[in-house]
Amino acid sequence: MSDRPFLTRRDVLVGGACLSCVPAFALAADAPLKEVAPGIHVRRGVDAEATPANADAIANVGCVIGRDAVAVMDPGGSLEDGARLRDAIRAITKRPIRYVVLSHVHPDHVFGAGAFEQDKPIFVGHAKLPIELAQRGEYYRARLNQALGDDRAGPVVAPTMLVSDHAELDLGGRKLALTAHAPGHSNCDLSVFDAQTSTLLAADILFVRRAPSLDASLIGWLKQLAALKSVPAKRAVPGHGPVEVPWPGGAADLERYLNLLLRETRAAIAKGLDITAAVESVGQSERGNWTLFDEYHGHNVTKAFKELEWE
């Protein structure tokens, strides 16, 4: 299930919708992990909404392997997706899975966590993730079960290690730097930087080619994206899109989209347009640049309008 909180078209895209997504799933979720840098392996999510066929395997997920242990970077979007990811990790390393990073609250990034409980890892999350899960977790789980069927969503798993600012995970000869971000894409985003390979695991602070999903603050997202651009990374792994892009150049399209959304929403408010008219007019020039644009863009305009109308 994607990271929009089950609004607008999602409410009707339940069950067997998007049959054309099935072949894409076969190429994405069933593909082996790709090593984007030494010891960093990523499975590309399919660009689709959650369906029974794709088991909500729509986010980029993977792992970082150190000398002594493994850190999972997002466990997947359902119990089935998480189990498939775990099997893929076990196929390339038998080192213990010590950490499972939950990059934020959205279902496609956290509902695979139950598949890793057998490893008894430390589940790592933003300091605000517990309250976000308490407020949304069971609702997300119920809606995901409706989309996937047969109670396939998996359990809500709370983090056991909280990051309020910065933290470090030691995998043995390899340390990962974690940053807890202020509200932007969501209220509880974590990013991970591997200095050994100059790789930024940006999760959903970075979308590439797939339409972004705004859940918290448009202005905040632009600020957090700007801050990440100062990270000395050579490559970034986005939460959605290709498994790696150059950094910071890979953020250019998202930055353009968010700035256009900001500029045109402010203009619509200044003209006295209501929110419905704004949704119909703001940002339409971006339609050809993103997959799932119609599924997400209207929601983004609505969120931006509510944020900006009282400036």
Image (tube, helix red, strand yellow):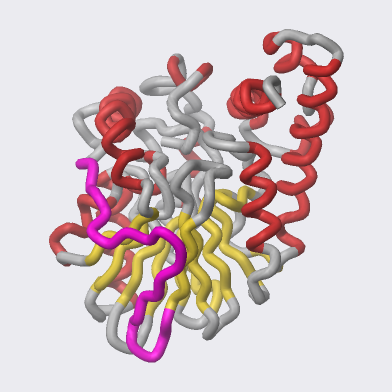
Residue 12 in magenta stretch = no
Asked if one can make out residue 150 in the rendered structure from this viewpoint, the answer is yes
Magenta segment boundaries in residue numbering: 155-175
Residue at image coords 71%, 27%: 311
Vertical order, 222 against 39 (above or below): above
Left or right of 38 in this view: 277: right
x and y, in percent, of residue 138 in the image: 25, 30
Q: Quadrant of residue 30?
A: bottom left
Q: Nearer the viewer, residue 186 or 38?
A: 186
Q: Quadrant of residue 305?
A: top right
Left or right of 3 in this view: 232: right
Residue at image coords 39%, 43%: 105
Residue 161 in magenta stretch = yes
Left or right of 87 in this view: 202: right
Residue at image coords 35%, 56%: 125
Residue at image coords 28%, 32%: 141
